[in-house]
Image (tube, helix red, strand yellow):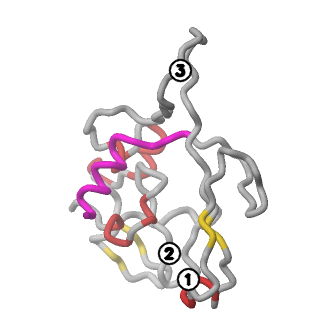
């Protein structure tokens, strides 16, 4: 499963619409999922719905014909390892250590974690609420979605 997600992060990243999908919205681009009243896992944390926004559609030139909805892929559809070092020089250089290989993650208390990805810049948005378990940085912005994605290929 993790290998499949790793490959997916190399070839697909949809463009979002950037709309706000509050629960009461009637926007057809929102397909929110309501959490049942008896769902203890979500309800005890105060979660009543999961906000789901459809991907931005590709809009081909208008030719008066109905077509299936297509989506914009922000990445190349090639297996090129962009989820490791990114697609731009600046990000790649930031991720590389001495010798051009992926730099090691450094624990906040000084202990090296040589098999983990580099630690994400503390000024950037991070989902982790545990200061001893920081967010990680890679060539793909979704690397923190799954803990199994945080292992360095070293």
Split into 4 quadrants, where in the image is the N terminus? Answer: bottom left
Distance, label 2 to label 1, CA atoms, is 6 Å
Q: Residue at x 59, y 37 (%)?
A: 56
Tell me where the magenta segment starts and ends, as one range: 1-15
Residue occupied by mark 1: 131
Q: Earlier in the sequence, mark 3 or mark 2?
A: 3
Distance, label 3 to label 1, CA atoms, is 51 Å
- Left or right relative to 38: residue 115: left
Q: Residue at x 45, y 65 (%)?
A: 144
- Tell me residue 142's x, y (percent): 46, 56
Q: Are marks 2 and 1 in contact (CB under 8 Å)?
A: yes
Q: Main secondary structure of the magenta part?
A: helix
Is residue 10 highlighted in magenta?
yes
- Name the disc covering residue 103, or none: none
Residue occupied by mark 3: 66
Residue occupied by mark 2: 134
Q: Which is more toward the observer, 72 or 138?
A: 72
Q: Earlier in the sequence, mark 3 or mark 1?
A: 3
Split into 4 quadrants, where in the image is the C terminus? Answer: bottom left
Q: Residue at x 78, y 61 (%)?
A: 24
Q: Which is more toward the observer, 151 or 49?
A: 49
Q: Secondary structure at mark 2?
A: loop
């Amino acid at each position: 499963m993790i290998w499949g997600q790793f490959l997916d992060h190399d070839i697909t990243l949809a463009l979002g619409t950037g709309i706000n999908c509050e629960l009461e919205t009637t926007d057809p681009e929102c397909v929110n999922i309501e959490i049942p009243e008896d769902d203890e896992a979500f309800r005890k944390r105060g979660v009543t719905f999961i906000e789901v926004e459809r991907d931005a559609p590709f809009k081909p030139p208008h030719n008066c014909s109905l077509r299936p909805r297509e989506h914009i892929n922000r990445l190349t559809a090639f297996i090129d390892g962009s989820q490791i070092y990114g697609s731009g020089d600046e990000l790649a250089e930031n991720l590389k250590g001495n010798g051009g290989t992926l730099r090691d993650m450094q624990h906040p208390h000084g202990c090296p974690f040589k098999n983990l990805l580099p630690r994400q810049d503390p000024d950037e948005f991070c989902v982790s609420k545990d200061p001893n378990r920081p967010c990680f940085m890679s060539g793909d912005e979704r690397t923190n979605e799954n803990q199994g994605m945080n292992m360095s290929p070293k």
